[in-house]
Amino acid sequence: MQKKRIMVDMSATLLHHGHVRLLKQAARLGGVVVALTTDDEVEKTKGYKPELDFAARKEILESIRYVDEVVPCPWLIDDEFLQRHNCDLLLHGDDNSNHIPPEKLVILPRTQGISSSSIRERVLNSLIALNLNNKPNNSSDVIARLLIETIKKEFRLE
């Protein structure tokens, strides 16, 4: 009997342990095909260019032992996309918005306390601490804080 092919779609703009846990669970069900959102789709949907481009994200994912294949994908995938890549199921976190028949969909809870957005926010907060906390308040601090708040809004981190 042939091993099932399990598709996991993700952007993985900043890969973290929640992604790895999802891939590990997918590997328990069969061979894992990652449908990786293209750079243009991330920019169009999320409004920014990924920190790592598609080639870098693909290389990282291909180095994970749970991943057998990585294919480019649009933001949303459908049953036709699963069929084109000979996949039996789509495994996704509980934020799924793909239009997949229920019998081909496996939904898992997201890993609590981690997301690419939360990593971005921690990086920004670290930059604030590194550059501002040990300096006396002055107009450049105000400008820096304003820029950081603007960045947070742009990346929807608030």
Image: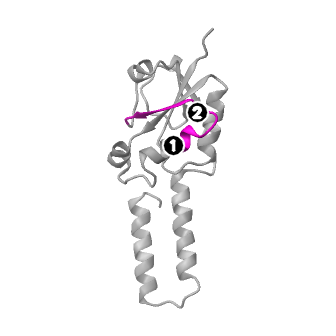
Q: Secondary structure at mark 1?
A: helix
The residue tagged 2 is: 67
Q: CA distance from mark 1 to mark 2?
A: 11 Å
Q: Provide residue 10's location: percent of width, then percent of height.
A: 49, 39
Instruction: Say if mark 1 contacts mark 2, CB within 8 Å.
Output: no
The number of numbered badges drawn on the structure is 2
Is 108 one of the magenta-colored residues?
no
Q: Is residue 142 above or below residue 65?
A: below
The residue tagged 1 is: 59
Q: The disc labelled 1 sits on which kind of residue? A: Glu
Q: Say which mark, if any, is on residue 105.
A: none
Apparent side of residue 19 relative to residue 157 in the rendered image (left or right): right
At x 59%, y 42%, the residue is: 19
Mark 1 against mark 2, which lies toward the viewer?
A: 1
Give the residues in magenta.
60-74
Apparent side of residue 107 relative to residue 25 in the rendered image (left or right): left
Q: Quadrant of the N terminus?
A: top right
Q: Secondary structure at mark 2?
A: loop
Q: Earlier in the sequence, mark 1 or mark 2?
A: 1
Is 68 in front, or is 102?
Answer: 68
Q: The disc labelled 2 sits on which kind of residue? A: Val
